[in-house]
Image (spheres, helix red, strand yellow):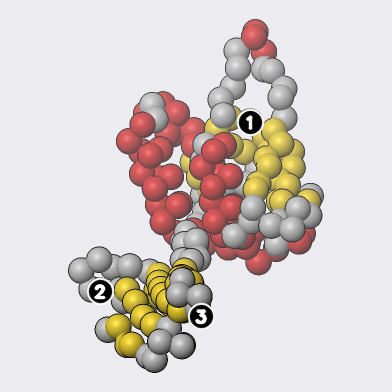
Amino acid sequence: MIKKRNLVNGVNANVSLEPTAASQSTSNINNNIIINKREDGKEDIVITRDVEVQVDEPKIVDVRNVILETYAQILLNQDKALISNLISKHCIIVPYESLREIIKSILNAHEVEIHLNEDVSCCGKVNPIHKIEAIKIIDNDGEIITDFKQVFNREFNELVNNYHLCLKYCVL
């Protein structure tokens, strides 16, 4: 592996680590070691490293998996009396955080804000089902889109018609 050249040019050694199947490495590292002899008898050592790092793109979460997990959590964790109230006019009312994740995954958005109506019902009892006032989408560029239904009409209709998601109410 070490190739010796004449003494004026020095010694050139190339060392490279190649990824093997056992290590499942995602980067290639090449080390170049060059030893030069100077005229005064001393040696100069030059080490260079070329690194190629392959960065995996973040996985895009399939909206169907997020919705399925949400429905499973509702069935497993919620009270039976509450489950009967969660299905309204062929739409399923999902929890606040789950709705944020569903909208975030279908749009591949940076952040989703859901603004709820904070109206307190009669006799001081707090209703767990709140009306959604607005859904704001924040893109990766930082742009805030305030009207989810108008701007992302195809995705809105897909959530309502195909997945029977209620986008008028959510459980807090």
Q: Nearer the viewer, mark 2 or mark 1?
A: 2
34 up-or-down from 90: above or below: below
Q: Can residue 50 be seen here?
A: no
Crowd class of label 1 (few under 14; some 14 to 19; many from 20; radius 10 Å): many
Numbered marks: total: 3
Q: Is residue 5 left or right of residue 137?
A: left
**Residue type of the residue flagged with mark 1:** His
Residue 22 falls in which quadrant of the image?
A: bottom left
Location of mark 1 (residue)? 130
11 up-or-down from 125: above or below: below
Q: Can residue 27 be seen here?
A: yes
> Residue 6 at what x, y percent from top left?
39, 91
Q: Which mark is on residue 39?
A: 3
Q: Nearer the viewer, mark 3 or mark 1?
A: 3
> Residue 98 at what x, y percent from top left?
51, 42
Say whether disc 3 or disc 1 marks the residue closer to the N-terminus: 3
> Residue 114 at what x, y percent from top left?
67, 40
Location of mark 2 (residue)? 20
Q: Is residue 40 left or right of residue 116?
A: left
